[in-house]
Image: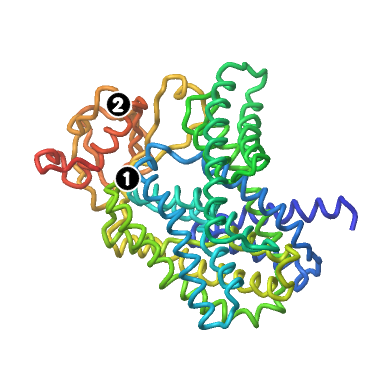
Amino acid sequence: MGWDVWLLLGAGIVIAAILAVRVAHRSGLPSLLIFLGFGLLVGESGFGLQFENPELAQQMGLVALAIILAEGGLTTNWNHVKRSIPTALVLATVGVGISVAAVAVPVHLLLGMDWRTALLLGAILASTDAAAVFSVLRRLPLPPRLAGILEAESGLNDAPTVIAVMLLSAATSPSLGSALLLVVFELTVGAIVGLAVGPLGVYALRRIALPVSGLYPIAVLALSFVAYAGAVLLHGSGFLAIYLASLVMGNSRMPHRAASRGFAEGVAWLAQIGLFVMLGMLASPSEMPSAIVPGLVAGLILVLVVRPLSIVLSAQLVRLARVDRLNWREQAFLSWAGLRGAVPIVLATIPWAADSVAEGTAKFVFNEVFVIVVVYTLVQGPTLPFVAKLLGLSTPDEARDLEVDSAPLEELNADLLQIKVPPTSKLHGVEIFELRLPTDAQVTLIVRDGRTFVPADSTRIRIDDQLLVVTTAACRDPVERRIRAISRRGKLAGWFGELGT
């Protein structure tokens, strides 16, 4: 086929994938499943397009994951995740180690895999997927601390997982002590590079007046990849570097920050579509039946035993260290919300492309991982809202960011919040002045029954109202806490000791 035909086919797939996102959003399905379906449709068992190049898939997949992590860092609100970082770090390091061992042992005993392949499968499945977590959980009204743990974990655990898979796929695996030292070295280098490039990038963008505003988003993404490539050249973790650099830039006051986030989000969606379609084309449905039973068994172990075990043990560590305390309901939700997505499938291409792993074994591992991701994402993704509600963790009254693509709010050092009043909220009947918000915050607009108006101090809030609150950045946290408190206990929340935390 000529290039024009390939271009038309690629554009058609992207448009179809964009339309499919709305279907996925309404159904609660992670969009990755639809994108994988497109790949299977145009692949060897569908339209017959052949793609059997694990080396190219690995390289393209790692670049796409870097883009997704950059977008995740740029769009993550530091105020929401900073309390969750200690717990997320434990889950992304100790939790990953527990997951690798807890998968390897039963897989070796029940499925008869040799120890190296069993450990390799455990390492591949140890990472939760940033794209799946961001796309599903950011639509769930979860408490900020819980959502922050899941977001930060998915952004941080890719780095140690990639290192582990690379080590297990090498021709000669190092000793356990050497492997641990190498992991620590690579993570340290990655963290240093990311935390150096991020602030330097913000400093440069603040002082260099670019002639066109559209250049700023491109510069931000390029700086993220400076961190990634720089860390890799220094034998560090590029994934950790790009996530931390992007996190710093996304939460700093820099020109056209909102536009940069929007651009990164669009590029990340394009990377997701291309990545999942490519992985779907790489898969061979005719070879999948032999991997179904082992995949279902390994997936069952992962979901019902390994993930809960890693959560419980990690929760005990953070409790003993007195940095956080997770109750049983939060631990249960974290156990069920460990979504796997493109990351395990991309990682499964690493041993497939390596000469040190037998091609038949590596291809079987790839097929097994593909089955696990598809089946258990299909089970877990749509049920997350129900599980959150069942555990009493759904909080539809939480204030949410409203995306604003303009500069004035950034120049004023202000934030715009959107609060939707759910049926069970005690905000109903409260007058605007009774909110007693800080003096640097103001309810500027109410959307009610499709009508928009500016409220007076005596305006009573009703069920299903949407409030737009403008607040200075310094007052944002007190505003959110006050609104949560009133929503839970009413306008006398302070008398009941409700602080909205």
Residue 218 to residue 271: above or below: above
Residue 264 to residue 64: above or below: above
Q: Determine the secondary structure under disc 2.
A: strand
- The quarter of the picture where the C terminus appears is top left
Task: Kindly indicate whether the residue at mark 2 contacts the one at mark 1 (C-beta within 8 angstroms).
Answer: no
Dot label at residue 441: 2
User: Horizontal placement of 1 versus 469: left or right?
Assistant: right
Image location of residue 359, percent across then percent down: 74, 72
User: Horizontal placement of 202 versus 424: left or right?
Assistant: right
Q: Determine the secondary structure under disc 1.
A: loop
Image location of residue 414, percent across then percent down: 39, 25
Location of mark 1 (residue): 398
Question: Tag 1: residue type?
Answer: Glu
- The quarter of the picture where the N terminus appears is bottom right
Q: Residues within 10 Å of mark 2 (few under 14, many from 20)?
A: many
User: Which residue occupies 36% across, 64% down?
Assistant: 386
